[in-house]
Image (spheres, rainbow, N blue to C red):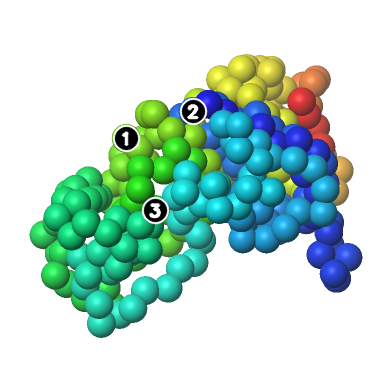
């Protein structure tokens, strides 16, 4: 079982090339899709979720043509979009029961068992009778995963699931995703590098509609050994340094500006440091590394 995406392209009416010959092969487990806002991540997710059309290319999941056999895909799919609405006056149990009906679970006992199991799995059993309008952001996201899991999907797509969550809810959501991703294909679309580093044995970076690189995090980090350099600078020096040095990222730490740069040779005034996945991400987006 795998998802094979081949030369998928999409241009919007305003001329934006959202996807540009995207090709990826995704095996069971957690797969991270990293990219800045506007990179094409959500366009790819919506296309795979059968919510919009591609201009060209193909996507095959376990022998099913994603672009042409939409009804078959939807029976295999669980989808948590970046933003989703809920009926604020309906309880979690009532809403999941409704979704289960829509998924074709007609037997009332089977439907109750399904709802009970999903509420337990997402740690929402104690608030099953609470109205959704009173849910916190993290509870809403866990409810979103619960509805996505109805029908035991084999392909699960989650789009920016941890944006806005507090640290405790983020950890809880990570644990839930890791548990789900053991036996099915789970695509995690995000701009948060740490989410991918924590959860995903394979990932890809996309920017301006193109896949810049794909692979396992460890080997991609290893590629940058001896090529990442660090320096602390005054804030007034930053603009000139960015104009004259191969700076890939800056961060304010305890009042000082920490600059990280990519270079195959030592940079004057910089110290060499170990690379991490964030360096891979920024180096790829800046055009320094690619597949």
Discs 2/1, front: 2
Where does label 2 land, which residue? Answer: 28
Residue 94: horizontal and vertical position, in percent? 22, 70
Q: Circle 1: is it few (<14), some (14-19), or many (20+) Cα within 10 Å?
A: few
Q: Are marks 3 and 2 in contact (CB under 8 Å)?
A: no
Label 2 – label 1 distance at C-alpha = 13 Å
Count every numbered label the image shows and give the total. 3
State the SS at label 2: loop
Label 3 – label 1 distance at C-alpha = 14 Å
Discs 3/1, front: 3
**Quarter of the image with the C terminus in it:** top right
Label 3 – label 2 distance at C-alpha = 17 Å
The disc, 3 or 2, on the residue closer to the chain's N-terminal end is: 2
The disc, 2 or 1, on the residue closer to the chain's N-terminal end is: 2
Q: Residue at x 68, y 18 (%)?
A: 223
| Residue 148 numbered tag | 3
State the SS at label 3: helix
Residue 142: horizontal and vertical position, in percent? 31, 55
Q: Is residue 153 above or below residue 63?
A: below
Toward the viewer: 79 or 196? 79
Residue 40 visible somewhere in the drawing = yes
Q: Is residue 251 above or below residue 11?
A: above
Q: Circle 3: is it few (<14), some (14-19), or many (20+) Cα within 10 Å?
A: many
Residue 27: horizontal and vertical position, in percent? 55, 26
Q: Residue at x 66, y 41 (%)?
A: 65
State the SS at label 1: helix
Q: Residue furthest left?
A: 126
Where does label 1 land, which residue? Answer: 179
Q: Is residue 220 above or below residue 3?
A: above
| Residue 285 numbered tag | none
Horizontal placement of 110 versus 143: left or right?
left
Q: Are marks 2 and 1 in contact (CB under 8 Å)?
A: no
């Amino acid at each position: 079982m795998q998802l094979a995406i081949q030369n998928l392209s999409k241009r919007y009416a305003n001329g934006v090339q959202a996807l540009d010959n995207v090709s990826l092969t995704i095996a069971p487990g957690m797969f991270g899709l990293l990219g800045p806002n506007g990179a094409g991540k959500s366009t790819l997710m919506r296309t795979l979720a059968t919510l919009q059309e591609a201009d060209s290319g193909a996507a095959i999941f376990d022998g099913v043509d994603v672009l042409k056999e939409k009804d078959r895909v939807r029976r295999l799919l669980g989808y948590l979009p970046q933003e989703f609405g809920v009926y604020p006056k309906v309880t979690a149990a009532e809403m999941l029961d409704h979704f289960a009906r829509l998924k074709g679970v007609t037997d009332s006992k089977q439907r109750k068992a399904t709802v009970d199991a999903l509420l337990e799995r997402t740690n929402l059993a104690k608030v099953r009778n609470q109205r959704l309008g009173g849910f916190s952001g993290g509870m809403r996201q866990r409810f979103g995963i619960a509805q996505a899991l109805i029908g035991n999907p084999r392909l699960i797509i989650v789009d920016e699931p941890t944006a806005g969550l507090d640290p405790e809810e983020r950890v809880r959501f990570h644990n839930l995703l890791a548990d789900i991703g053991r036996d099915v294909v789970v695509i995690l679309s995000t701009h948060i590098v740490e989410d991918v580093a924590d959860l995903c044995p394979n990932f890809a970076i996309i920017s301006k509609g193109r896949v810049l690189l794909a692979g396992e995090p460890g080997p991609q980090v290893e590629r940058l050994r001896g090529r990442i350099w660090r320096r602390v600078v005054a804030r007034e020096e930053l603009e000139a340094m960015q104009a004259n040095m191969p700076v890939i990222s800056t961060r304010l730490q305890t009042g000082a500006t920490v600059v990280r740069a990519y270079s195959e040779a030592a940079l004057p005034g910089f110290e060499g440091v170990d690379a991490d996945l964030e360096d891979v991400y920024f180096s790829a987006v800046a055009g320094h590394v690619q597949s």
